[in-house]
Image: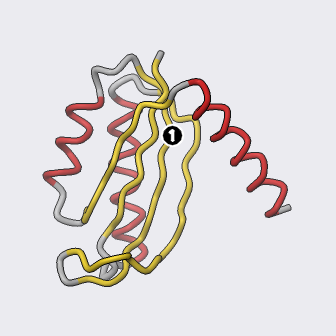
Amino acid sequence: MNHYETVFILNPVLSDVQIEETVKKFEDFLINNGAKMVAKENWGLKKLAYPIQNKKSGFYHLFEFTNSGEVVTPYEQEFRRDERVMRFLTVKLDKHAVAWAEKRRTRNKTAKA
């Protein structure tokens, strides 16, 4: 099983309900295609480094999942089809990146507690 991480930016004019629906849509797509969700993070509204589609901010979300790899291409195709998504990036994590992601998650949990 390969370990993947996807960060995507949603349009800032979306309502909370629309954001939840979009995130749920992509999470369900992964689960229905055999991926196992490892982590899911909502980073909230952040200022962009440069304008995208004349927008200066966007809602950031991160998915971490495992899969054998055949789901990544159709998953990215769904991102391209959805007009609510401004940008996305999916990367395959090596063993060092997986360890770093686990360390970051535990650090975030202890900071919230």
* Residue 77, quarter of the rendered image: top left
Colour scheme used in the picture?
Answer: secondary structure
Q: In the depicted view, which residue is nearer to us: 29 or 65?
A: 65
* SS type, badge 1: strand
Furthest-left residue in this view: 81
Whole-percent x and y of residue 10?
33, 67
Tell me: residue 9, above or below residue 75. below
Q: In which quarter of the image is the C terminus?
A: bottom right
Taking the spot 33% from the left edge, 26% from the top edge, the residue there is 33
Tell me: residue 72, above or below residue 76. above
- What is the count of numbered marks? 1
Q: In the depicted view, which residue is nearer to us: 48 or 59?
A: 48
Whole-percent x and y of residue 74?
20, 33
Residue underneath mark 1? 64
Taking the spot 41% from the left edge, 52% from the top edge, the residue there is 7
Taking the spot 41% from the left edge, 71% from the top edge, the residue there is 59
Taking the spot 20% from the left edge, 45% from the top edge, the residue there is 78
Going by the image, does 93 lie left or right of 25?
right
* Residue 86, quarter of the rendered image: bottom left
Whole-percent x and y of residue 52?
23, 74
The crowd level at tag 1 (other Cα within 10 Å; few <14, some 14-19, many 20+) is many
Give the amino acid type for the residue marked by disc 1 in the picture. Glu
Whole-percent x and y of residue 25?
33, 49
Going by the image, does 99 lie left or right of 81?
right
